Amino acid sequence: MFVFYLVCTLCFFLNVICFFDLLELNDGFICLDGRSMNYSKTQGQVLSKMIVIGLFCVFLYVVGLWYDPFYFPEGLDFVSRCESFFPFLLCLAMPLLIAIMRVARYRFFHKNVIDAAEQSHNKVDKNLLVLQSLLTNTLEQVVLALCVYLCWLALAPSEDLSVICLSALAFLFGRVLFFIGYKYGAGARSLGFILTFYPQVLLILHMLVVYVLLPFCFYTI
């Protein structure tokens, strides 16, 4: 319980620091150390979304640990934990499948990019580059999420599985928002990116504190 409150407190103060570290003053922002910095409108939009979505991710983390909305029983072994969670991996597979299919579909219906060998000698297609960027970003996020979820399955007790289930659902929803908002600029697509990325950061923080730092401190003492 102490660790739970510790991680929540750390996450809360990280968001508060991000908020107060950049206070709007006239045409720019002033930092706590007295240095003034000018931020564009887009940077301001991204910052505001970082704070709001960050707090929402903390809320999901609290709900998953405190209330266990999926009601996983205690004492499940590793295989049983995997069997219970693996259906939620579809939340990672679906965005990756969509990203791959969008690239394949664009290549098929555009003669100038259907042959990758010929494309290297032709002018770069900007629309294809956008789709490839979406695919690359999604693949990176999927790999990170898989690593985090596997570590959680191996280390965390079964009653805490709701946390990664909520994280997987947030991943799916965040990727959809990222795909939709990508063409509207950084301010729009940041919403989906943060919703995809922040839950993994919280899970890594939790595991570092609970399963690395605290055991190390107790063993050394």
Image: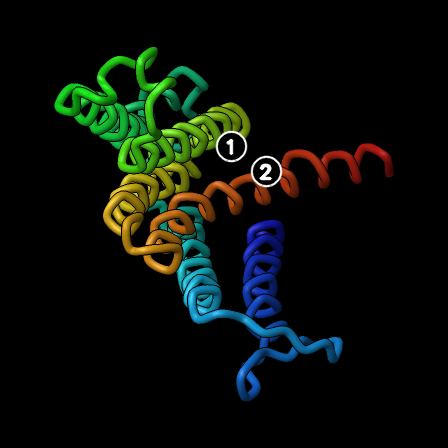
Q: Position of residue 27 (x, y in %)?
A: 53, 84
Q: Earlier in the sequence, mark 2 or mark 1?
A: 1
Q: Are marks 2 and 1 in contact (CB under 8 Å)?
A: yes
Q: Residue at x 50, y 31 (%)?
A: 148
Secondary structure under badge 1?
loop
User: Residue at 57% across / 43% down in the picture?
Assistant: 206
Where is residue 81? Give x, y as percent. 39, 23
Q: Is residue 35 left or right of residue 221?
A: left
Q: Is residue 36 left or right of residue 181?
A: right
Residue at the extreme bottom: 26
| Label 2 SS | helix
Q: Residue at x 86, y 35 (%)?
A: 220
Inspect this view and state whether residue 70 appears: no
Q: Say which amino acid is labelled 2.
A: Met
Residue plotted at (55% across, 64% down) = 15
Quadrant where the C terminus sits is top right
| Residue 188 quadrant | bottom left
Q: Which residue is disc 2 drawn over?
A: 207
185 with respect to 29 (left or right): left
The residue that disc 1 covers is 156
